[in-house]
Image (cartoon, helix red, strand yellow):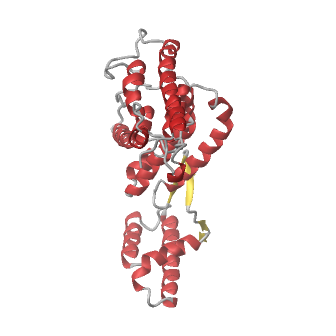
């Protein structure tokens, strides 16, 4: 055991006294750290050239140890719905979310294949998003930027899967449809928990503000919206050898066919109907349009864009014109 660890435990023993009931637990911890230190030194003796790899050797020892002085050692465990490991990283929780979401998707696919886009979003928000809520504290404490990006990427990927849209759909559109900022949610949750803890210490009731729910931008959107999104990532029939897709940039500059961008259709034709022209307006009142009315208004608009796309593909097949 290192001298800093020994000094810390000696100070604890001095503070609690010899007749304290927790003294036995402290002694158990001292024995555990002593045993770990002995094994680490034995490993260093077998590898005398690895003086600069003491931390890595220590980690390898911890991975191989199953129990110490009768106390089991586990790499990760589930506590109140959240998987945690020794580094408090998001890896264990993300792996659990992906496994759980895949199971839910396989069971819900018969419903998702025939539901509207809003129905698919509701299934994601109801069944999958609470799993990410459990990871908010871990995300706020996660020091690795790579792991933070990975959590956001997994969230977007599962959302695309539930909406039955391609994995290659651009992230700007996906995040605007989902309207869930995990980083902001993690910071707000950390602040609220700190305020609640302070109120508990002061023995006063917590009277925080109720969170404002984001507007549902997919309210009443029909299922053919997903079909229009997927048209952007379909393979170009004339450029299969180049592995090109029929996004609007490719159709315009390779084949001279100009169609509106999917993000522009979303901002100009979909959002003004579902959330209004000014998103700061309170659309939660009883005067907001019904889902049936929104669907009746959006279906012909989306169908027109789909027909334009299909006409462009037919024209492309007939002419075979390609700019080299």
In the rendering, at what x and y percent does residue 8 appear? Answer: 37, 70
136 or 36: nearer the viewer:
136
246 or 13: nearer the viewer:
246
User: Looking at the rendering, in which quadrant would you find the N terminus?
Assistant: bottom left
Indicate left or right for 81 with 138 as reference. Answer: right
In the rendering, at what x and y percent does residue 163 appear? Answer: 55, 34
Q: Can residue 211 be seen here?
A: no
Q: Give the quarter of the image for residue 288.
A: top left
Q: Give the quarter of the image for residue 269.
A: top left
273 or 265: nearer the viewer:
265
Extreme top residue here?
287
Can you say whether 204 is above or below 140 in the image? above
In the rendering, at what x and y percent does residue 32 appear? Answer: 52, 72
The structure residue drawn at horizontal position 43% and vertical position 80%, both measured from the top left corner, is 53
Q: Could you tell me how many numbered marks the image carries? A: 0
Q: Can residue 53 be seen here?
A: yes
The structure residue drawn at horizontal position 34% and vertical position 37%, both measured from the top left corner, is 199
Can you say whether 15 is above or below 147 in the image? below
The structure residue drawn at horizontal position 33% and vertical position 19%, both measured from the top left corner, is 277
Can you say whether 289 is above or below 233 in the image? above
In the rendering, at what x and y percent does residue 195 appear? Answer: 34, 38
């Amino acid at each position: 055991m290192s001298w800093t660890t020994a000094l810390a435990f000696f100070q604890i023993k001095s503070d609690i006294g010899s007749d304290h009931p927790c003294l036995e637990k402290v002694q158990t911890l001292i024995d555990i750290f002593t045993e770990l230190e002995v094994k680490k030194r034995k490993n260093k003796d077998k590898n005398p050239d690895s003086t600069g790899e003491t931390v890595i050797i220590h980690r390898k020892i911890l991975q191989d140890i199953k129990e110490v002085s009768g106390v089991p050692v586990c790499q990760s465990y589930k506590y109140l719905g959240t998987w945690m490991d020794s580094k408090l990283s998001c890896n264990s929780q993300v792996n659990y979310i992906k496994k759980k979401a895949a199971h839910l998707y396989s069971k819900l696919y018969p419903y998702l294949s025939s539901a509207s886009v809003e129905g698919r979003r509701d299934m994601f928000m109801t069944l999958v998003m609470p799993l990410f809520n459990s990871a908010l504290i871990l995300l706020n404490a996660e020091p690795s930027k790579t792991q933070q990006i990975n959590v956001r990427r997994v969230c977007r990927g599962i959302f695309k899967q539930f909406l039955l849209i391609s994995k290659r759909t651009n992230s700007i559109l996906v995040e605007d449809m989902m309207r869930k900022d995990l980083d902001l949610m993690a910071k707000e949750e950390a602040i609220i928990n700190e305020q609640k803890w302070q109120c508990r210490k002061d023995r006063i009731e917590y009277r925080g503000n109720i969170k404002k729910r984001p507007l549902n931008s997919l309210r009443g959107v029909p299922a053919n919206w997903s079909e229009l999104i997927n048209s952007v990532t379909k393979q170009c029939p004339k450029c299969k050898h180049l592995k090109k897709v029929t996004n609007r940039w490719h159709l315009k500059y390779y084949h001279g066919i100009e169609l509106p961008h999917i993000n522009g259709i979303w901002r100009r034709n979909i959002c003004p109907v579902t959330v209004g022209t000014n998103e700061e307006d309170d659309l939660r009142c009883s005067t907001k349009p019904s889902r049936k009315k929104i669907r009746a208004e959006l279906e012909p608009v989306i169908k027109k864009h789909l027909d334009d796309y299909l006409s462009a593909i037919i024209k492309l097949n007939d002419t075979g014109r390609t700019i080299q």
